[in-house]
Image (cartoon, helix red, strand yellow):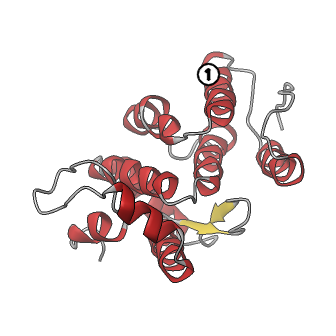
Amino acid sequence: MLSVIWPFTWSRFPIREYGMNYESQPLQWHEIESMRNEASITSRVVQSYRLMLDFYGMRLESEETGLLSRSSPSGFAPRYANLVRSGHNNLRISRILKCLSELGLERLNAGFLLHVLNEQSEHGYLSSSMIESSMDRWWANCLRNEEERSWIASVIQKVRRDEGFVWSREMYEKALERRRISGGLDGPLSRSTS
């Protein structure tokens, strides 16, 4: 089980800063450039991301857009419950999102953030003060693209402040498709209750 193998996250998702593990060494700029330019390395990072998503009860539907879904109709619930219950996962997720950004895979971060927001808003899953705080304060700030970071922050704030607003699966999918076509997530946020 991955939760017992604590080195998995820091060894598969290196970042430019020291982590909670004294054995993890920060990435250097020249290492980042080499890793970004090596398709086999970025492919392994995406494979590790898929593995972690499965551990969290999620599945990567599109490597191009970052679209996620639940891992399976019956298997996601206990994994979501573990994610809500085990706060150490929040640090792992922060590290994963930072690594994806470092290695030029940042497009996957928006898919993760907006999926979690959809689950919170439309279905009531992954709604704990710990996850919401991590998402609002840390995960959303792992995005380097200022426009995406700002737009996602505004969606998060709208969900948190406007009880009648629901960030639906349809809105999630449309946002990622809009980015695929036009290059940006930015779009209208309409009121939705379905």
**Count of labels shown?**
1
Q: Position of residue 47 (x, y in %)?
A: 51, 78
Disc 1 target residue: 157
Residue 108 % position (x, y): 61, 57
Task: Name the residue at 37% across, 61% down.
Answer: 30
| Left or right placement of residue 55 versus residue 187 in this view | left
Q: Amino acid at mark 1?
A: Gln
Side (left or right) of 70 relative to 78 = right
Please give the name of the residue rendered at 64% of the width and 70% of the height, measured from the top-left corner: 73
Q: In which quadrant of the rendered view does residue 154 lie?
A: top right
Q: Residue furthest front?
A: 30
Q: Is 43 or 48 nearer to us in this picture?
A: 43
Q: Is residue 153 above or below residue 63?
A: above
**Numbered disc 1: secondary structure:** helix
> Looking at the rendering, in which quadrant would you find the C terminus?
top right
In percent of the image, x 81 and y 46: which residue is there?
183
